[in-house]
Image (cartoon, helix red, strand yellow):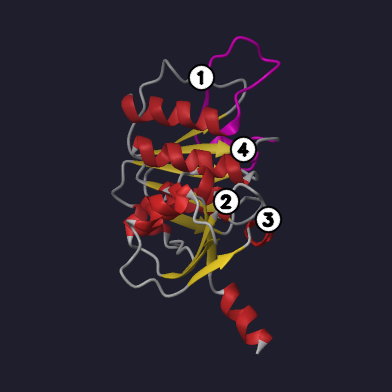
């Protein structure tokens, strides 16, 4: 019986925090299975409550320490939801006809990923492509860092950066590769649509195997000895490319 229950748990995603759960419920893309909260209802539950379906399948009232263990963090705001898994898209041919897509190559920090996805949603990026090899995927921490806005994005999953670039290139996209140095000043370029902006790993940047497939661009900064956080750089570049193309 325990094995059956564990298998069922593995077929669900855990989401925590009021913003994440509210946006998930508003988007109506995923099924809600259960809510976990404290016996003394937190303020976050009252914020979420108005968006809950009339018949919530299962509400569990537990000690806050139970929530800490479930989430693996204390940053859950007293409420956790178990929902159906996030559905990635896999057929990259479906980005044909889009004007602006974001390709992430080896972004490993789940919170950086969440912050990038939050900016992508706010700026109006048409699609985001994640690479399964060496990159972070969508977790509860990612979802919270995005304030739940991952629910409004078309997110594709490619096996590798090389595969993604090959597929996107075949659709006629113009690649702009974010690099720390030796790139063109990103504020001086007129960008040509359709655009694929590539953001690389926090530590090593964009894979050398694909850097020659597009225009290298750099954000001007005061000193070359330090650099923008990956999510900050991504936000700046997404805004620049969106409004200069």
Task: Give me the residue at 38% from left, 42% from top.
Answer: 121
Question: Which residue matches tag 2?
Answer: 76
User: What is the number of the mark on residue 120?
Assistant: none
**Majority SS type along the magenta span:** loop
User: What is the number of the mark on residue 184?
Assistant: 1
In the rendered image, residue 74, in percent from the top left (x then y), is placed at: 65, 49
User: What crowding class fits label 4: few (fewer than 14 Cα within 10 Å), some (14-19), or many (20 or more)?
Assistant: many
User: What crowding class fits label 1: few (fewer than 14 Cα within 10 Å), some (14-19), or many (20 or more)?
Assistant: some
User: What crowding class fits label 3: few (fewer than 14 Cα within 10 Å), some (14-19), or many (20 or more)?
Assistant: few
Circles 2 and 3: CB atoms closer than 8 Å: no
In the rendered image, residue 54, in percent from the top left (x then y), is placed at: 30, 69
Question: Which residue matches tag 3?
Answer: 72
The quarter of the picture where the C terminus appears is top left
Q: Secondary structure at mark 3?
A: loop
- Distance (Cα) linking label 2 and label 3: 9 Å
**Image: 167 above or below 220:** below
Question: Which residue matches tag 4?
Answer: 206
| Badge 4 or badge 2: first in the primary sequence | 2
**Image: 89 above or below 136:** below
Circles 1 and 2: CB atoms closer than 8 Å: no
User: What crowding class fits label 2: few (fewer than 14 Cα within 10 Å), some (14-19), or many (20 or more)?
Assistant: many
Task: Give me the residue at 57% from left, 35% from top.
Answer: 212
- Distance (Cα) linking label 4 and label 1: 15 Å
Q: Secondary structure at mark 4?
A: loop
| Badge 4 or badge 1: first in the primary sequence | 1
Q: Secondary structure at mark 1?
A: strand
Circles 3 and 4: CB atoms closer than 8 Å: no
Q: Secondary structure at mark 2?
A: loop
Q: Which span of residues is magenta-colored?
A: 204-230
- Per the image, is 220 magenta? yes
- Distance (Cα) linking label 3 and label 1: 42 Å
Which numbered disc, 4 or 2, marks the residue closer to the eye?
Answer: 2
């Amino acid at each position: 019986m325990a094995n059956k229950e564990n298998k069922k748990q593995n077929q669900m995603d855990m989401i925590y925090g009021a913003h994440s759960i509210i946006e998930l419920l508003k988007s109506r893309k995923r099924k809600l299975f259960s809510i976990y909260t404290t016996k003394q209802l937190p303020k976050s539950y009252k914020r979420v409550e108005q968006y809950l379906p009339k018949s919530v399948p299962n509400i569990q009232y537990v000690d806050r320490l139970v929530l800490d263990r479930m989430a693996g963090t204390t940053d859950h705001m007293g409420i956790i939801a178990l929902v159906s898994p996030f559905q990635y898209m896999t057929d990259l041919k479906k980005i044909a006809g889009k004007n602006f897509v974001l390709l992430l190559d080896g972004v490993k920090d789940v919170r950086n990923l969440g912050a990038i996805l939050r900016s992508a949603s706010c700026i109006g990026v048409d699609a985001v492509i994640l690479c399964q090899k060496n990159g972070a995927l969508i977790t509860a921490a990612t979802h919270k860092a995005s304030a739940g806005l991952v629910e409004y994005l078309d997110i594709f999953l490619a096996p590798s950066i090389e595969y993604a670039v090959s597929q996107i290139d075949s659709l006629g996209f113009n690649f702009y590769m974010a690099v720390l140095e030796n790139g063109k000043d990103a504020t001086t370029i007129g960008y040509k649509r359709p655009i694929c902006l590539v953001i690389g790993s926090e530590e090593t940047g964009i894979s050398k195997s694909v850097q020659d497939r597009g225009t290298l661009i750099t954000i001007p900064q005061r000193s070359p000895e330090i650099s923008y956080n990956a999510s900050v750089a991504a936000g700046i570049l997404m805004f620049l490319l969106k409004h200069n193309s």
